[in-house]
């Protein structure tokens, strides 16, 4: 899951730090060992797909996303105030942040929520792991200054073969369908592709703005919240009831999956570097699968874990 734009080399899933200033200030050594924080981050992001599924059982997808953004923005805003950091300046910067908020927050968060109305949280988590593949495909199509190697192209082919295995594409050849709801699957894959497009946009427009990672990310979440606050009332009606379970799921999704997770990941990148921090990407679909099967009783066929491993190998 992604809340904010990534540092160069940051994970393809989850809310990584903003690229504006990757070394803006010296980092104090945290009290908790990085391995413990790494594990916590993997669990938070892995369980995010379960929380989305639970949230949509009581609220409309747009409401789930808006609630998530509100809680996540509140966390980063509170930390921003405590650290007495200023928001970025300049209309141009805010314009680019508005686009980034749509591509990296409002759109993919909403698409995943709609997708999980008809597909399992397990499948959504695996689709999220395709983001590096979309990034590679985008670099092939548009980023002439970052052309992939032959090994990268091979990884792209392997990864998308893994997607076909996850979906059970051979079933369509025998008239059995793909084994998953087609619309929900496409929505989840488009959400993952949106992350790739958003990161490419941010890299080209916001890499040298001078703002801190925290300030840029908090601003981006604030703008994404504003976008959803305008759209949500137009397409949903005010809830007539507020079921506690889904409400707690939405709150946890925002506070932990969008707020706390960003702070954990930013600290990890600063302490152990983006390359090692990137490994979190490979644990997210595993945890999402385990959580969906164990806690939601989602059915798991052989091709799902096998295809997920192929996807991760390609990524």
Image (spheres, rainbow, N blue to C red):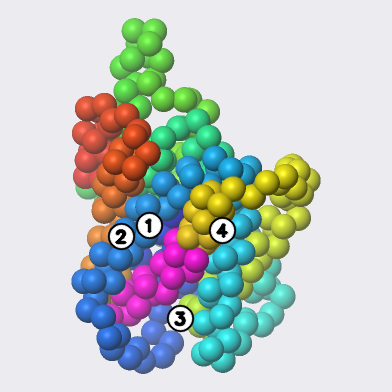
Nearer mark to the viewer, of 4 and 3 = 4
Q: Is residue 306 magenta?
A: no
- Residue behind mark 4: 68
Q: Secondary structure at mark 3?
A: loop
**Percent position of residue 35, x then y:** 21, 71
Cα separation, mark 4 vs mark 3, equals 26 Å
Q: Residue drawn at (28%, 72%), measured in percent from left and top?
A: 37
- Residue bearing mark 3: 21
Comparing 20 with 257, the one in front is 257
Q: Position of residue 299 (x, y in %)?
A: 32, 29
Taking the magenta stretch, the answer to whether it contains residue 261 is yes
Name the residue rendered at 56%, 58% in the picture. 68
Image check: 81 left or right of 266? Answer: right
> What is the span of residues highlighted in magenta in the rendered image?
255-271
- Looking at the image, is mark 2 or mark 4 earlier in the sequence? 2
The span from disc 2 to disc 3 (Cα, nearest Å) is: 24 Å
* Mark 2 and mark 1: Cα distance apart in space: 5 Å
Q: Secondary structure at mark 4?
A: helix
Q: x, y percentage for residue 289?
A: 30, 42
Secondary structure that dominates the magenta span: helix
Give the mark, 4 or 3, whose residue is nearer the N terminus.
Answer: 3
Above or below, 148 relative to 309: below
The mark lying in front, picked from 2 and 3, is: 2
Looking at the picture, does residue 5 appear above or below residue 45? below
Q: Which residue position is annotated with label 2?
A: 42
Q: Nearer the viewer, residue 168 or 236?
A: 236
Numbered label attached to residue 45: 1
**Is disc 2 in contact with disc 3, using a CB cutoff of under 8 Å?**
no
């Amino acid at each position: 899951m992604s809340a904010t734009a990534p540092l160069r080399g940051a994970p393809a899933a989850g809310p990584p730090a903003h690229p504006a200033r990757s070394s803006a200030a010296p980092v104090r050594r945290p009290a908790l060992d990085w391995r413990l924080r790494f594990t916590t981050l993997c669990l938070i992001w892995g369980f995010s797909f379960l929380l989305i599924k639970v949230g949509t059982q009581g609220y409309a997808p747009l409401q789930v996303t808006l609630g998530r953004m509100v809680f996540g923005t509140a966390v980063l805003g509170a930390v921003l105030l405590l650290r007495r950091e200023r928001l970025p300046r300049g209309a141009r910067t805010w314009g680019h942040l508005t686009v980034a908020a749509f591509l990296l927050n409002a759109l993919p968060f909403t698409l995943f929520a709609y997708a999980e109305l008809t597909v399992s949280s397990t499948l959504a988590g695996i689709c999220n792991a395709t983001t590096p593949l979309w990034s590679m495909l985008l670099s092939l199509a548009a980023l002439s200054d970052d052309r992939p190697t032959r090994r990268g192209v091979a990884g792209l082919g392997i990864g998308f073969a893994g997607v076909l295995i996850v979906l059970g594409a051979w079933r369509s050849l025998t008239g059995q369908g793909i084994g998953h709801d087609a619309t929900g699957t496409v929505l989840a894959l488009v959400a993952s592709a949106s992350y790739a497009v958003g990161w490419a946009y941010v890299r080209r427009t916001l890499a040298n703005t001078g703002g801190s990672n925290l300030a840029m990310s908090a601003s981006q979440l604030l703008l994404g919240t504003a976008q959803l606050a305008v759209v949500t009332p137009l397409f949903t009606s005010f809830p007539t009831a507020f079921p506690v379970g889904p409400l707690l799921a939405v709150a946890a999704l925002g506070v932990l999956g969008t707020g706390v997770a960003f702070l954990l990941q930013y600290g990890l990148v600063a302490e152990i570097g983006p390359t090692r921090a990137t490994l979190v990407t490979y644990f997210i679909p595993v945890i999402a699968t385990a959580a969906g099967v164990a806690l939601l009783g989602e059915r798991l066929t052989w091709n799902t874990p096998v295809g997920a491993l192929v996807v991760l190998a390609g990524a």
